């Protein structure tokens, strides 16, 4: 059974794609155009009632929320491809902790920067300068904590690559390459080395090559 | 080894407490006063560098982020107490999906309501009426989707109680009992029955009895 992944050009589905490649799981992609509002059409809402990306279909099994999907495949194919959950329940606990940190501390201010710095001008809307300043400050504080952590272990959850690192790739790419804020990463020695390490993985390079971002 | 849980009177640590009780895991609590800023003191920041609650210590093992901690204990004690992750990898996938929905769709607007309706007046600050209106609308849209889901299965991830339901208790309690918005739940038949079911569990009643909310 080949997994279907909706909306591959957008950032959150890329979290799923890079995971599937790491796990050597075959997939195909289904285009979905957010700019045309295809995510609000009744057929799509049957799959994902909140109208968000991504969603996957795996035979009769439908699942949404990117960080739920990557946990599912990391567990389902535990013995295939890269181990992404750590080897012990304690290691998995730390993977879960840093996945939550990514979701609640890293992602929100980076998303705000992407929306304000990249997307608002595209739509002819003014950027919210106060929100940009606040987001810049939040992202840098988070990266200070990452710098400390990554001075003690090679990856976030320990000395092993995991879902916690992988989950940073789609919006980390925007932050480093598209918002003019690469210096936030480059000014922090361990964060910079970590970013080079995870973003140069063949899985991520393949995602970038196959599915260009819309912006 | 007895698990230490920091800050039991606050909402997010209650997510951990109710999980530990369901899993029949012994714990003790360590008071932490957010109102006095004890979460920003150096000793605490060594445990939780973001200065947030909760954190647990289990022997030499320290873990933070409430939804990571509950996953850890649900997995570590898989065969003890209530099964909270489902029985199969597909069931766990759906538990993860609805845990993410709780974190990203339910929690943010409910937190905004708690801050604006309950905490702002306590601090003598004006409430943001626009944010309250937007949050009211968001919460009701989310509960419409829950109503549809709960018309098809008894709990969010299926016909079994799980971390996905449990995770709604601490802020669901605020929403129903403390913000004057119990009608959001009561106007939706299946959501109302679900809330009565999960909030009447002995584990949650024990948490409420032992650790009063600060407000």
Image (spheres, coloured by chain):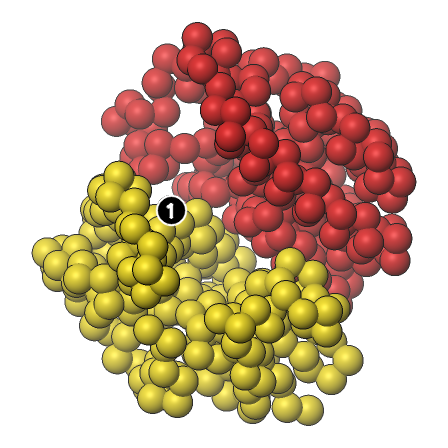
Chain colours: A yellow, B red
Q: Is residue A211 above or below residue A173?
A: below
Q: Which residue shows up at 52% across the image and 76% down it?
A: A33
Residue A10: name its quadrant: bottom left
Nearer to me, B107 or A128: A128
Q: Which residue shows up at 56% across the image and 37% down it?
A: B134
Nearer to me, B176 or B75: B176
Q: Is residue A191 left or right of residue B181?
A: left
The picture places residue B44, in percent across and down from the top left corner, at 34, 28
Residue B97: name its quadrant: bottom right
Nearer to me, B186 or A98: B186
Q: Is residue B8 above or below residue B149?
A: above
Q: Which residue is mark 1?
A: A105
Position of the C terminus of chain A by quadrant: bottom left
Q: Which residue shows up at 76% across the image and 57% down it?
A: B157
> Visible in this render: residue B121?
yes
The picture places residue B35, in percent across and down from the top left corner, at 41, 14
Q: Is residue A5 left or right of residue B86?
A: left
The picture places residue A145, in percent across and down from the top left corner, at 25, 46
- Which SS class for mark 1? helix
Nearer to me, A154 or B163: B163
Q: Is residue B38 left or right of residue A16?
A: left
Residue B153: name its quadrant: bottom right
Q: Residues within 10 Å of mark 1 (few under 14, many from 20)?
A: some
């Amino acid at each position: 059974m080949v997994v279907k992944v909706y909306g591959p050009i957008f950032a959150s589905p890329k979290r799923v794609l890079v995971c599937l490649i790491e796990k050597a799981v075959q997939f195909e992609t289904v285009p979905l155009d957010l700019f045309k509002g295809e995510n609000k059409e009744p057929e799509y809402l049957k799959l994902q009632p909140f109208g968000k990306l991504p969603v996957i279909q795996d035979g009769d099994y439908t699942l949404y929320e990117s960080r739920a999907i990557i946990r599912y495949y990391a567990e389902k194919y535990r013995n295939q491809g890269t181990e992404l959950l750590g080897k012990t329940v304690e290691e998995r606990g730390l993977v879960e902790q840093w996945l939550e940190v990514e979701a609640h501390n890293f992602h929100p201010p980076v998303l705000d920067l992407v929306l304000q710095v990249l997307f608002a001008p595209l739509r002819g809307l003014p950027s919210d300068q106060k929100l940009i300043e606040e987001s810049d400050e939040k992202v840098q504080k988070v990266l200070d904590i990452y710098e400390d952590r990554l001075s003690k272990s090679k990856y976030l959850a320990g000395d092993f690559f995991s879902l916690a690192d992988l989950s940073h790739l789609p919006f980390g790419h925007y932050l480093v390459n598209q918002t003019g804020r690469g210096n936030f990463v480059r000014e922090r020695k361990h964060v910079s080395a970590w970013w080079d390490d995870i973003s140069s993985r063949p899985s991520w390079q393949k995602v970038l090559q196959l599915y260009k971002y819309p912006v």
